[in-house]
Amino acid sequence: MGRTKIKIDHSKCGFGVSTDPRDCRRCLFVCDPAILLMHPTLEDHPNPHNPEKWIVDAIWLSLCTGCMRCVNECPEGAIQVFPG
Amino acid sequence: MCKYCLQHGDGGKWYENARLYSDALADEYNLGEYLEEQWKNMETLFIRKIMGFNSIGLGYKMKMPIIGRILRWAVERQIHSESKGRNPVRADGHFGQVLPMEDAIHILGNLAAEPIIKNYCICRYMQRGVKDAVCINFGQLSEVIEKHTRYIPEGVKYKLDREEAIAALEAQNKKGYVASVWFQPVPYINAICSCETPECGGLRLRNDFGLETVYKGEYIINVDIDNCQGCKECVSMCQFSALRYLPSVDRVIVDLNKCFGCGVCRHACDHDALSLIPRDDVPGQAGKY
């Protein structure tokens, strides 16, 4: 059985670029199995009281159903899904 | 679950033991510090490593021969940890149980330590991108969460008295959210959440990966075959896919193995066909939490 792979380009969606995932959140909204996770990074995290550096990652990969809605919804074209 | 009933519930339901809500207990275990650390870092929970593995692709990792089984063992041990060296940023010892609205109201009305607040569900924000102020927290946890303004709902009253907390819980339950009560960490009880699948971190790990982060409730649903009119309304309420409509017999059937006994489906029934009965009254489900 193949494994689903999902690539998210953090140079298009993330911190320090034009789209902060916390403002957009469209991929999260359209993902029925909710396999994506928006979270602060563990690196460069000096002030956890006010986490500033947020990214979206695909976490629950085995539950991805390959619907491609996130790919189509992302305004930055930052998501690539390779269904397993 | 009965392990926790005997150990922390004096033989009854663990969440009905008033001592587990007390400030004295929180102080005894010095849990203020734990909660502070946990909530400072709550959003990083799923990317933290356990024995070198984080949750990314957890389903695949747990299927790996040998390593998968060791990982499962390590995670279970962490979830139920009562040891002194618990790691707050990994939420060691944080697990809960689904409960019906009546029991949740009893807790909020009689057992929960003040102050009581409601705050944004962090699971739902991180995985669905929705800010939804449905988590009701109490005791020392309220004071911790208040310091972190990102969890505090904007423009609404978030400090609740008991009546307001009950009203909020009731409204959420009727909308279809499942009430759950949480050790955080065991044995201190300080939260009643209104969860939905698949976003709830606890229900996710339980239903999709078989980890015991959330136990099934003390009850189970009973469908009265004579009263059911086959209107299907209840099917849309079930967060666990335990109910299904069968055209051939024009009624709803229930998969008791999936039922968590939350009782949310009852709100949709106009025909008095759904009721909760104690889990132990059903021989095939007794003791299966």
Image: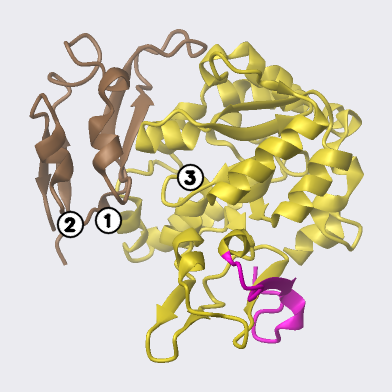
Chain colours: A brown, B yellow
**Pointer 3: what residue?**
B201
Q: Residue B98 versus residue B106: which sits nearer the camera?
A: B106
Q: Which quarter of the picture shows residue A77?
A: top left
For the residue labelled by badge 2, is the local secondary structure a helix, a strand or a loop? loop
**Pointer 2: what residue?**
A3
For the residue labelled by badge 3, is the local secondary structure a helix, a strand or a loop? helix
Residue B215: image location, x then y, percent: 63, 59
Residue B204: image location, x then y, percent: 45, 52
Query: Marks 1/3: CA distance?
Result: 16 Å
Q: Is residue B87 visible?
A: no
Q: Amino acid at mark 3?
A: Gly
Chain designation of label 1: A
Chain designation of label 2: A
The residue at 76%/81% (across/down) is B281
Q: In the image, is residue B282 part of the stretch drawn in magenta? A: yes
Of the 4 image quadrants, the one containing the C terminus of chain B is bottom right
Q: Is residue A71 above or below residue B286?
A: above
Q: Amino acid at mark 1?
A: Ser
Query: Marks 2/3: CA distance?
Result: 22 Å
Answer few, some or many: residues within 10 Å of disc 1's Cα (few below 14, many 20 plus, some between 14 and 19).
many
Q: Which quarter of the picture shows residue B13?
A: bottom right
Residue B249: image location, x then y, percent: 44, 91
Image marks 2 and 1: residues in contact by CB distance under 8 Å: yes
**Pointer 1: what residue?**
A62
Of the two numbered discs 2 and 1 on the same chain, state the one appearing first in sequence: 2
